C-alpha cells in the first residue's frame, strides 16, 4: 500500500509539473506574441501608405508566410472557422479605421477593453469562468490603462472611438472562438483571417491612392507581415491551446505598454510619470495573475 501511495503521489507530482509547464509555455508564447504585435508602430512609421494598403500588404505577406509554415492548412470552412476568420479580419480593419479617425491613444485604449469582453463571453461560450486573480487583474488593468493614457485622452471623436470599441469586441470574440478550437487547428483559422483581411483591404485600396514602392516601404511591410503579425499568429495559436482566453487577453495587454517603449528607443520620446506608473501596474497585474493561475493549476492537478 505504501508503494502504491508513493507511486500515486509521484504520478500526481509529474502531472502537476506537466500542467505547470504547459501553462508557463502558453503564457510565455502569448507574451512573445504581444511583443511582436507592439512593433507595429515602428514599422508603420516607415511606410508612407494609406492604412488599408498597409493592411492589405501585411496580411498578404503574413498569409504567404503562414501557408509556408503550415504547408497543409486545414480549411474546414466550418461556421466556427469562418466566424473566427471574420472576427480576426474585423479586428484588424476596425483598428485601422479607428486609428484614422481618432487619436492613437484612444484607439488602442478602447480596443483593450477586450479582456473585459472575454471575461463576459468566456463563461457562456467556453465554460471558462474567471478566477479571483483574473477579476483583480482586470480592475488593475483598467486603473493602469487610465493612468497610461490620461495625458492623451479626449482628443478623439465618436466615429473613431466607436470603431475602436468595436475592434475590442471583435478581438475578444476572435480570442474566444480560437480558444474553442484548442483541440483543433486555430492557426489555419488565423491564416484564413489574414487572407480575408488582404482581400477586403485590397478591394478598399482600389478606391484610394496607390502606394509608393520604395526599398524602405518594402522592408517595413515585410517586417509587418512576417514578424509583427505572421510569427505573432504562430505564437498566438500556440498559446491559446494552453491557456484560457482570458489569460491570453490579460497577457496581451503588454502590447500597448510596450508601444511607447519602442518609440522611446527609436525617437527618444519619453513617456510621462503617469504612463510609467500605469505601465508598471499593468505589468505587475499580468505577472501576478499569471503566477497565481499557474500555481493553482499545479496544485489542482497534484
Image (cartoon, rainbow, N blue to C red):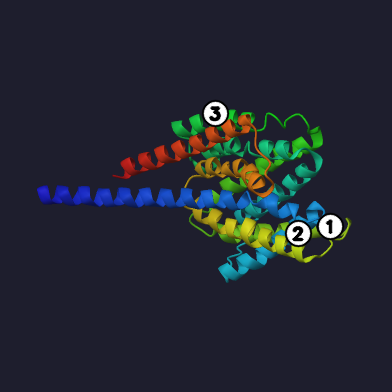
Earlier along the polypeptide chain: callout 1 or callout 2?
2
| Residue 109 in picture, x, y percent from top left | 67, 36
Residue at coordinates 79% horizontally, 52% vertically from top-left?
51
Earlier along the polypeptide chain: callout 1 or callout 3?
3
Does the residue at mark 2 contact the one at mark 3 (Cβ under 8 Å)?
no
The Cα atoms of the two marked residues, 1 and 3, are separated by 40 Å
Q: Residues within 10 Å of mark 1 (few under 14, many from 20)?
A: some
The Cα atoms of the two marked residues, 2 and 3, are separated by 36 Å
Residue 56 numbered mark, or none: 2
Residue pointed to by mark 1: 205
Residue at coordinates 76% horizontally, 29% vertically from top-left?
154
Residue at coordinates 26% horizontally, 48% vertically from top-left?
12
Q: Residues within 10 Å of mark 2 (few under 14, many from 20)?
A: many
* The C terminus lies in quadrant: top left
User: In which quadrant of the rendered view does residue 58 lie?
Assistant: bottom right
Does the residue at mark 1 contact the one at mark 2 (Cβ under 8 Å)?
yes
Element under label 2? helix
| Residue 44 in picture, x, y percent from top left | 73, 53
Residue 63 higher or lower than 181, as above or below: below
Amino acid at each position: 500500500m505504501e508503494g502504491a501511495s508513493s507511486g500515486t503521489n509521484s504520478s500526481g507530482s509529474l502531472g502537476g509539473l506537466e500542467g505547470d509547464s504547459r501553462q508557463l509555455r502558453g503564457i510565455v508564447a502569448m507574451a512573445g506574441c504581444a511583443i511582436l504585435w507592439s512593433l507595429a508602430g515602428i514599422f508603420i512609421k516607415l511606410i508612407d501608405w494609406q492604412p488599408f494598403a498597409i493592411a492589405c500588404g501585411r496580411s498578404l505577406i503574413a498569409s504567404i508566410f503562414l501557408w509556408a509554415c503550415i504547408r497543409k492548412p486545414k480549411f474546414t470552412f466550418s461556421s466556427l472557422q469562418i466566424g473566427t476568420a471574420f472576427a480576426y479580419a474585423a479586428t484588424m480593419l476596425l483598428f485601422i479605421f479607428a486609428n484614422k479617425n481618432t487619436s492613437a491613444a484612444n484607439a488602442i485604449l478602447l480596443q483593450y477593453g477586450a479582456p473585459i469582453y472575454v471575461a463576459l463571453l468566456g463563461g457562456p461560450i467556453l465554460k471558462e469562468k474567471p478566477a479571483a486573480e483574473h477579476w483583480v487583474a482586470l480592475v488593475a488593468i483598467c486603473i493602469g490603462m487610465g493612468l497610461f493614457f490620461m495625458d492623451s485622452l479626449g482628443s478623439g471623436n465618436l466615429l473613431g472611438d466607436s470603431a475602436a470599441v468595436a475592434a475590442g469586441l471583435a478581438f475578444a470574440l476572435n480570442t474566444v472562438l480560437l480558444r474553442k478550437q484548442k483541440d483543433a487547428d486555430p492557426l489555419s483559422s488565423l491564416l484564413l483571417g489574414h487572407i480575408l483581411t488582404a482581400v477586403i483591404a485590397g478591394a478598399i485600396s482600389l478606391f484610394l491612392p496607390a502606394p509608393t514602392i520604395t526599398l524602405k516601404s518594402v522592408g517595413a511591410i515585410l517586417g509587418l507581415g512576417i514578424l509583427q503579425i505572421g510569427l505573432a499568429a504562430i505564437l498566438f495559436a500556440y498559446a491559446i491551446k494552453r491557456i484560457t482566453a482570458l489569460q491570453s487577453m490579460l497577457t496581451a495587454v503588454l502590447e500597448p505598454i510596450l508601444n511607447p517603449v519602442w518609440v522611446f528607443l527609436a525617437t527618444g520620446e519619453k513617456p510621462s510619470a503617469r504612463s510609467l506608473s500605469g505601465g508598471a501596474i499593468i505589468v505587475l497585474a499580468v505577472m501576478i495573475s499569471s503566477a497565481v493561475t499557474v500555481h493553482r493549476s499545479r496544485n489542482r492537478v497534484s
